Image (tube, grey):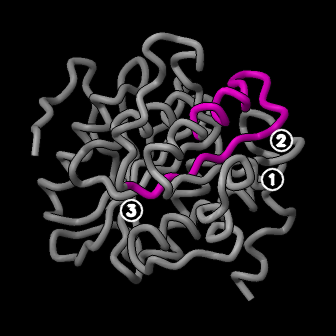
Amino acid sequence: MAQHAPPARGARLGRAAGATGSVSTDSTVNGVVLLLPGASRFSPGPLRVLARALGRAGGAQGLVTHQVLHGSGPREDDAGWAADEAVRRYGDVPVCLAGYDAGGLAALRAAGHGAVNSVLALAPCPGRPASADPPEPVKQLAGRQVLIVHGTNDARCDPESSFLLAARAKKANRSTCRFEVHSDGHGLRDHQAEVVALSVDFVLGAMFTGRYSRPVTDALAAPPPLGLRMPLASGFGRSLRG
């Protein structure tokens, strides 16, 4: 496995959380989620709420989350270094890269790391338009479980760009799906509970059980464009808690 030196801008892992709270050295860790924030620390999107939800839902299974702390902005080398660090700390465990905004793009680009088994990209901002030469890479997503979530009213990161990226990714990796959050904006605030529930369902399925809720299963199985424009239903997650 390639080793990534600590990036010059000082990427580091935040405090470990999950597995029933703070993780001690003798805790059993069976999976790690690395949270990659957006370009602005003042706009965390749903990542903070997601971290707490993952701790509640996955802590008993040995799931640990770390925020990837960075200097001026998230990069795929920060994510790659963080995955190396997770392996160094916890051994051969699956890693999920979960990013928001520019962090979502970093997660997608760094998916080729050998420890990564899944990628969650929330309102990602593709770095290159679909017409660019070369276009945004997707081959690194092969063999990973991939979920992209985007609000249809996102005025900052064009949701159509993430759809076109997902369509290319689907050709390289059938285990790719994308959900649209109708009427929601870039921060995914209006339907945050549903976005978080969807994300938790995906992460736990990808890392532990191999099983997903019916909407995620259908989205992964559906051919384009159906599985890449799957609407996120209002109230998603309530039946999962019942």
Please tell me in which quadrant of the rendered image residue 81 appears: top left
Q: Which residue is mark 2?
A: 184
230 relative position to 18: left or right = right
140 relative position to 36: left or right = left
Label 3–label 2 contact, CB within 8 A: no
Whole-percent x and y of residue 52?
54, 62
Label 2–label 1 contact, CB within 8 A: yes
Q: Nearer the viewer, mark 3 or mark 2?
A: 2
Q: Earlier in the sequence, mark 3 or mark 2?
A: 3
Q: Nearer the viewer, residue 211 or 90?
A: 211
Q: Label 2 sits on what residue type?
A: Asp
Say what secondary structure mark 1 lies in: loop
Whole-percent x and y of residue 34?
38, 50
Say what secondary structure mark 3 lies in: strand
Q: Which residue is mark 3?
A: 17
Q: Nearer the viewer, residue 130 or 75?
A: 130
Q: Which residue is mark 1?
A: 191
Q: Nearer the viewer, residue 175 or 75?
A: 175
Taking the spot 39% from the left edge, 69% from the top edge, the residue there is 207
Question: Which region of the structure is painted magenta?
Answer: 144-166
Query: Would residue 156 be counted in the magenta stretch?
Result: yes
Where, quadrant-wise, is the C terminus in this rendering?
Answer: bottom right
Taking the spot 70% from the left edge, 83% from the top edge, the residue there is 241
39 relative position to 6: left or right = right
Q: Height in image: 238 above or below 33?
A: below
Whole-percent x and y of residue 57?
52, 76
